[in-house]
Image: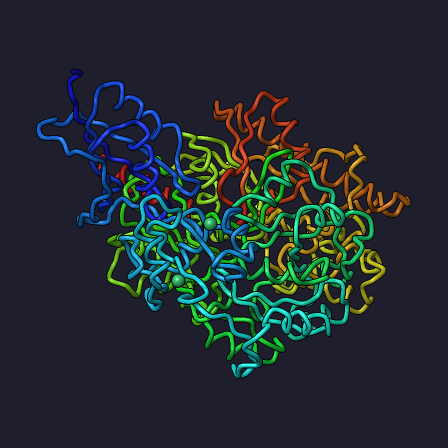
Amino acid sequence: MKSTRGLFITVKGTVQGVGFRPFVYRCALQSGITGEVRNDGTGVLIRAFGTREMLDRFTRSIKETSPPLAAVRSIDIREASADDPPAAFSIAESGSGQASEIDIACDTAVCPTCLAEMLDPSNRRYRHPFINCTDCGPRYTIISALPYDRSNTTMAAFTMCEACRNEYEDPANRRFHAQPVCCNDCGPRLVLTNGRGSVLTNTNLIDRALEMLAGGGILAVKGLGGFHLVCAADNGDAVARLRLRKRREEKPFAIMVANSEIAKRLACISPEENALLESPERPIVLLRKRGSCPGIAPEVAPGLPTLGIMLPYTPVHHLLFLDSKFPALVMTSANLSDEPMIFGDADAFAALSSVADAFLTHDRAILMRNDDSIVRVVAGKPIILRRSRGFVPEPLPSPENVDGLIALGGVLKSTVAVGRKNDCYLSHYIGPVETTQALDPMVAATNHLVSALGISPRAYVCDMHPQSLVASYAESTELPVVKIQHHHAHAAACMADNEVPGPALAIVYDGTGYGKDGKTWGGEILHASYAGFSRFGHLAYLCLPGGDEAIRNPGRIALAAIFRLLGDKAAGALPWMPPVEASAILDMVKSGVNCVQSCGMGRLFDAASALLGICTKRTYEGQPAIMLEGAADPLETGSYGSPLSVEEEGILIDGSALLCEVYDDLKSGTPVPKIAARFHTTIAQATAAAATIASQQSNCTTVCLSGGVFQNTLLVERLVPLLSQAGLTPLLHRRTPPNDECISYGQLVVAGAKRALEAGG
Ligand SMILES: [Zn+2]
Ligand SMILES: [Zn+2]
């Protein structure tokens, strides 16, 4: 008889609430071992007994396969005493122990198995609007604390029926310990109400909701991470009404379509883009419109060649498309203007009663908002533009210990990030934090992560801007506060995302950030390590006549730039600008009164867009630059003279000189699409040249590209090959957005590095 051996195995990562124990149980039965598996605060613990061959087979199967939502980070295997092994394999009760190393799974689209059950008239969950299993459904948005047990979720309010409990307790069942398990008899209830919360109907809710949409109505629909505002995408009047009620002028709406076949009729979709559309994360994918985009009202994404499309991800979405004849539905986060997405029923009724004609909601509470994520494929690779539902709270790496650090992020595209050991947990997208009121969602996001991950806060990390609301909040607490420069945070986020040890060069192009010298930065060529940085060069300062007014009306920046070329004649240079306004702006430029100096690269793109008459008034962040990119002729390869020089203060890119060339080209009758493309190419060439000089000065060849400007596909696709040709290694963000959503992550890794340095020295 072969001798029995014993192993003690610890598996760490996202291994609870994802069907890991039944998976281990099945592996154990297949390999013939005995023992037990249990959850505890550090992960999943396994005691395994059998012959060497059986144990080898068992460990191989848990190393090589895993359930869909699990993310195994480490498997530790130790020899154990084989005295008195059990006769069978079993799933044991959860041990206690501190929940200090467990990760929470992301909210995930309904899986194909559940969907098939939902569509099967003989299944007991036929048309169940909340069907889920260990492979799919809500997680992050319903968990209040670890361990991940039903009592720590918003499903605690629902008592399982006998049939559901049998599935929940059967290790062989797909719903074994699926905490949100429920059915038509015992689960949450869907309800259709009017704007005051009065029930409209209890039967045929979906039919009634679809009737309202067909009549041009606007519905508020509760999803996984909050409410959406929904209307028929082919009904221009309905879309225009939604814009008016939501106070959203031109910012594009995302749409949802039934499947990728329909998506392909509306947009050009590459295999990479299709894979993203159909992925379990189900992000909004930013796609190039196909022709006139039949069936989509022009009001959905006015003036843009792109369209944000996603596929259904909750059972309710599937029910809506199953029964409807709509090719597409507008599906936009329910909020007013740019405020954070609404996720509570009471808030929804209070804020949206004059926006939505009816509410399709339910009684399973959402604990934390989680907007739709947005992804775009650039140069064949996905770039995340908003990292939220489906991706949060998957941990991100840090080169140093970040335990107990809480980073509060930037102002406009705000996120927070919390540290546990060497892991960074970046929150969902929060939205702008510009008012005292707007601090609440930021604090709620922080508390949710701190509580759900079992973190003890030790210090706050925030931006170094002296008038920051967020900094005032951090300083009002008992904890120490660490301040980090905005563009250093960008550089560090891109470095950490790519697991670069540093130092590295970083090109950080964005709109605005407070610089070390008190000026407004945003066109930065940096040499950065995690603990510090130096500024090798930047975009030459542009004059913003009227400060914030010039951000809303970027023609002002263009006018100030071409004043250098034309003098007072510049007053008539922009045909769309009234002469009185133009001469008032020139007076400001000449006197310097009320002029702000900024080297934000985003401002230069906005100014070029206005100069070319493409977008003269900004109604949402990034609009002029997005429309400039959209207008550019992708086949045009010409460019302008190099705006680069090396001065005493470092490498300078002269944006005003470039705008003067753009103006001359326009006057000579060159078509706008060609000029827009030449502008992009010139920026790419100047950037590559600047990086080459910085590389010679620093002996560094890695170049991290961060900042909102790198959401621009055309710029990235022109710049990356130039950097490679120069012998440099360009790195884009991989798991985090290049825009200010990455700031909290960067702040966290920088603060961790500074703390390690202080402790070491
Ligand atoms: Zn499922
Ligand atoms: Zn049930």
Residue at the image point whose x is 78% and y is 64% from the top: 582
Residue 6: quarter of image = top left
In depth, the one of 683 and 5 nearer the eye is 5
Q: Is residue 246 visible?
A: no
Residue at the image point whose x is 32% and y is 65% from the top: 156
Q: How is the structure coloured here?
A: rainbow
Residue at the image point whose x is 60% and y is 76% from the top: 358
Outermost residue to the left: 83
Query: Is residue 395 placed above or below 557 in the rendered structure?
Result: above
In depth, the one of 666 and 112 nearer the eye is 112
Residue 188: quarter of image = bottom left
Q: Quadrant of the N terminus?
A: top left
Q: Is residue 45 left or right of residue 292?
A: left
Outermost residue to the front: 122
- Rendered location of residue 325, percent (x, y): 72, 61
Outermost residue to the right: 669
Q: Is residue 557 left or right of residue 169?
A: right
Q: Is residue 103 visible?
A: yes
Q: Quadrant of ligand 2?
A: bottom left
- Rendered location of residue 284, percent (x, y): 60, 51
Residue at the image point whose x is 55% and y is 62% from the top: 316
Q: Is residue 723 left or right of residue 18?
A: right
Query: Is residue 635 placed above or below 513 in the rendered structure?
Result: above
Q: Quadrant of the C terminus?
A: top left
- Rendered location of residue 282, percent (x, y): 56, 49
In depth, the one of 167 and 450 nearer the eye is 167
How many marks overall?
Answer: 0
- Rendered location of residue 27, percent (x, y): 33, 32
